[in-house]
């Protein structure tokens, strides 16, 4: 057993951390948060130039052809600096759908463009508040035309392409659903920017009116492929969350060491120490669960659904807790616009909801436990 | 990153599995007693017999060097052995854990070669059991505030005082004793480490009945107990430094051995069998959410242990981050057992064979408070994480540089 990243992967981490510390300071995050731009375009370009977008994309499509572990390393570093780029939409979701279900032609057409940073993609599932179940998917794809709408689509204003979960028949349950690949510059696509808690990652409503689109993967398998996309995204984005949670802990710890009250550093008080120790514990458990998910993803192990759910739940809880308690350690200053705490708090919540809420993942985890126990 | 065995690891796994298959029966599914220190005659005899068998093969301490009676193996091999042993119905040997996990490593670090040779092998074979005599009624979390007095008398030391919470003292042959040899020095500087026979004249052991009903630990009274100076470990006044060696091993021993308790698996079994108001418990959304919460903590801890083991196998020292294990396990046990009792409804108040699931959750619930305290309280462990891992400033300690006999309450 060797439960650690390799020396090369650690080198990649150091390289990524160095570059991002330089190219993605908090003021860059704020510029997107407060501005009209949907993402930090120069940063996206740098990331593309480094080859990171193609990390886990096979070489035949212009990628580096490295494994999922390298991608996890990158995701963690992007999470650490709250990188305001459409990485999780494009790489963790859109590309995963393409790799899982795309035809050779579709992959050849789009993947090289993604590697170069020219194409941004997103994954559009949700149509209304509440649960996402097969019966709640109304957007319909018939005879090459897509109609309907999707809401809360991350990076929906900026994306060039979307993979959408669509209805291809009135058959009940999962079998009525498929995935559709749609060029968002096509005639009949309307986009509307939506207000959201974390504008450093913007969301949109997409409306389709008889838009020319194509199928991605076999008819009737959309729900199952979407589930596999979500599993992969859950692992990759768990690393993004763990990176963010670690940054919160570092920030709060630094503050506790330097801020003095009652004649001593507040970090010498046990009320603060124990809070930070609890953040540390949550982060370590989340990191370990994420590592296991990374292993399952990189080896395509049958434990992937269980480990993805565990990685996601653990990382979501850790990042939320770290971000909330980091504000608390900072006191009043932590609740100001000027301090960076709220940037992390908002991203933590955005990521907590991005792939569906805790209750869905917890139910999925127990379903997998039941399955593995039955086997 | 690779969870699979390397060819060498797989070969080792096959080797220990074959040996276990020849020497033990497959595992049953029942559970141990509370806090895991059974001391009936039969349990003890079975434990000693099993330990002796393992010692002959070098399996009693796989990572110890061969000349010390180990296998000269790696930390990963120890994990592999533990995983394989868990598949068999073998005697519970946790009564040797304190001796082999803490006392003997301290002895190996500080005793002369001859002295070490005399004690290591019998401890390894389960012939002699050791206990750790550190805590006192007035020195628990603040163990350096202990008051048991050791005064020089010719070539001997004379010890008087009282220890408490001494796990297994009532069946131990030897004890590792931390005593105060200088009351004029600040509290950490006046301590000296010794070891002694628990049958020395003047040693009196009184079991303490725990809130859970069991009696696994004791008060130990010392009345003019004579200890030869040859049984001193480390220099006079250096006892705290020696104790830190013991405590570092304690974290590893306690943290590493907690995986086998009640966990999500047992809760899943219960939830599968129980009917609630609205149908099977396992179909209830609230139940499923809680199971998932505990599962991610269990799994997270398991894989954290693997990360620690990976570091160990590369020859890196495990740091205080191992302290997270006990906090997580003990609190999870308490919450999970209380929740299982909730699922059982009114019948959850019953215990033992009268309770559902043979009362395992009631037993776990009654034991959990002890686990949250033993071997470092939740609070002390959080301090350790905060100070040694996160580098936060130490607490302000008003008695740190004061002569011990001037500390309020100490004399």
Image (tube, grey):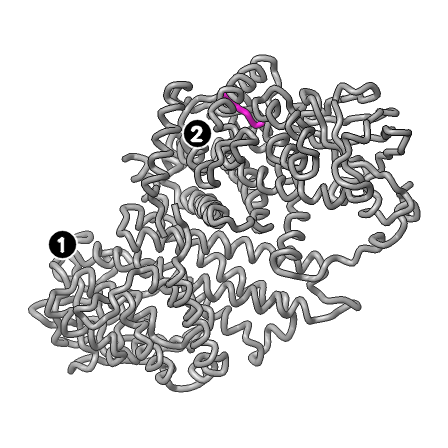
Question: Which residue occupies 64% across, 46% down?
Answer: B378
Q: Is residue A351 in sight in this rendering?
A: no
Where is A71 relative to A133, above or below?
below
Q: Tell me where residue A36 appears, x and y as whole percent.
A: 39, 86
Closer-to-camera residue (A204/A109): A109
* Viewer-closest of B76 and B335: B76
Q: How crowded is mark 2: few (under 14 residues within 10 Å), some or many (20 or more)?
A: few
Magenta span: predominant SS is: loop
Q: Eyeballing the image, is A228 above or below A306?
A: below
Taking depth in this image into account, of A352 and B314 the one nearest to the observer is B314
- Residue displayed at 31% across by 60% down: A68
Element type at marker 1? Answer: loop
Q: Residue A373, image x and y in percent?
A: 33, 36
As drawn, the residue found furthest toward the bottom would be A36
Q: What stretch is highlighted in magenta?
A: B91-95
Specify the quadrant that holds the N terminus of chain A: top left
Subunit that carries the residue with mark 1: A
> Is B94 colored magenta in this rendering?
yes
Q: Where is residue B315 drawn, in percent x and y?
A: 50, 48
Residue B142 as seen in the image, left or right of residue A243: right
Check if residue A107 falls in the magenta segment. no
Residue that appears at 58% across and 66% down: A326
Which residue was labeled with disc 1? A171
- Residue A367 falls in image quadrant: top left
**Residue beneath label 2, please?**
B86
Helix, strand or loop at label 2? It is loop
- The answer to whether residue B131 is seen in the rendering is yes
């Amino acid at each position: 057993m060797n439960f650690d990243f390799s020396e090369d992967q650690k080198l990649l981490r150091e390289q990524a951390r160095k570059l991002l510390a330089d190219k993605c300071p908090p003021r860059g995050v704020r510029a997107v948060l407060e501005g009209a731009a949907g993402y930090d375009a120069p940063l996206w370009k740098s990331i593309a130039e480094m080859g990171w977008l193609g990390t886990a994309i096979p070489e035949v499509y212009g990628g580096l052809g490295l494994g999922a572990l390298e991608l996890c390393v990158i995701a963690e570093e992007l999470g650490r600096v709250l990188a305001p780029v459409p990485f999780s939409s494009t790489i963790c979701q859109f590309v995963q759908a393409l790799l899982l279900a795309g035809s050779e032609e579709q992959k050849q057409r789009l993947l090289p463009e993604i590697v170069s940073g020219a194409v941004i993609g997103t994954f559009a599932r949700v149509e209304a508040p509440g649960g996402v179940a097969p019966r709640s998917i109304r957007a319909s794809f018939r005879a090459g035309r897509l109609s309907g709408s999707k809401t809360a689509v991350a990076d929906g204003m900026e994306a060039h392409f979307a993979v959408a979960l669509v209805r291809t028949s009135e058959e009940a349950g999962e079998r009525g659903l498929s995935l559709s690949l749609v060029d968002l510059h096509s005639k009949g696509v309307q986009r509307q920017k939506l207000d959201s808690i974390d504008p450093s990652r913007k969301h949109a409503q997409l409306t389709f009116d008889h838009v020319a689109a194509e199928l991605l993967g076999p008819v009737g398998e959309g729900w199952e492929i979407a589930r596999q996309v979500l599993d992969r995204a859950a692992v990759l984005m768990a690393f993004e969350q763990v990176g963010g949670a670690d940054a919160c802990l570092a920030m709060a710890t630094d503050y506790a060491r330097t801020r003095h009250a009652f004649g001593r550093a507040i970090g010498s008080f046990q009320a603060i120490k124990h809070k930070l120790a609890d953040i540390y514990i949550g982060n370590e458990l989340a990191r370990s669960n994420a590592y296991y998910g990374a292993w399952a993803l990189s080896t395509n192990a049958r434990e992937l659904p269980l480990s993805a759910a565990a990685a996601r739940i653990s990382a979501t809880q850790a990042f939320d807790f770290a971000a909330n308690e980091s504000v608390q350690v900072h006191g009043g200053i932590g609740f100001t616009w000027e301090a960076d705490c709220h940037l992390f708090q908002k991203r933590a919540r955005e990521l907590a909801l991005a792939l569906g809420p805790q209750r869905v993942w917890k139910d999925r985890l127990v379903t997998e436990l039941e399955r593995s126990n039955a086997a | 990153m690779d969870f699979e065995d390397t060819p060498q690891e797989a070969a080792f796994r096959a080797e220990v599995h074959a040996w276990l298959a020849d020497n033990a029966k497959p595992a049953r599914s029942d559970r141990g007693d509370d806090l895991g220190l059974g001391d009936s005659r039969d349990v003890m005899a079975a434990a000693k017999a099993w330990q002796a068998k393992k010692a002959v093969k070098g399996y009693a301490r796989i990572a110890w060097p061969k000349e010390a009676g180990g296998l000269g193996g790696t930390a990963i091999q120890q994990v592999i052995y533990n995983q394989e042993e868990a598949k068999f119905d073998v005697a519970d040997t946790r009564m040797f854990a304190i001796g082999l996990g803490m006392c003997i490593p301290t002895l190996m670090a500080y005793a002369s070669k001859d002295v070490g040779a005399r004690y290591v092998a019998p401890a390894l074979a389960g012939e002699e059991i050791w206990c750790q005599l550190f805590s006192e009624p007035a020195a628990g979390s603040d163990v350096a505030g202990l008051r048991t007095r050791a005064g020089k008398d010719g070539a001997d030391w004379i010890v008087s005082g009282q220890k408490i919470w001494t796990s297994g003292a009532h069946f131990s042959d030897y004890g590792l004793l931390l005593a105060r040899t200088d009351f004029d020095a600040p509290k950490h500087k006046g301590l000296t480490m010794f070891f002694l026979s628990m049958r020395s004249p003047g040693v009196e052991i009184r079991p303490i009945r725990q809130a859970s009903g069991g009696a696994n630990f004791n008060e130990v009274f010392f009345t003019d107990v004579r200890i030869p100076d040859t049984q001193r470990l480390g220099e006079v006044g250096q006892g705290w430094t020696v104790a830190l060696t013991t405590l570092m091993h304690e974290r590893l021993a306690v943290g590493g051995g907690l995986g086998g308790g009640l966990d999500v698996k047992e809760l899943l079994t219960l939830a599968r069998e129980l009917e609630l108001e609205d149908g099977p418990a396992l179909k209830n959304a609230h139940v499923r959410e809680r199971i998932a919460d505990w599962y991610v903590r269990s799994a997270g801890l398991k894989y954290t242990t693997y990360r620690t083991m990976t570091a160990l196998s590369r020859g890196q020292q495990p740091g205080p981050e191992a302290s997270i294990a006990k906090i997580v396990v003990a609190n999870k046990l308490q919450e999970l057992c209380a929740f299982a009792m909730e699922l059982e409804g009114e019948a959850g108040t019953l215990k033992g064979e009268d309770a559902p699931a043979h009362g395992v959750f009631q037993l776990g619930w009654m034991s959990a408070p002890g686990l949250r305290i033993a071997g470092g309280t939740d609070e002390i462990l959080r301090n350790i994480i905060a100070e040694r891992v996160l580098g936060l400033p130490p607490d302000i300690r008003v008695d740190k540089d004061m002569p011990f006999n001037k500390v309020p309450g100490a004399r």
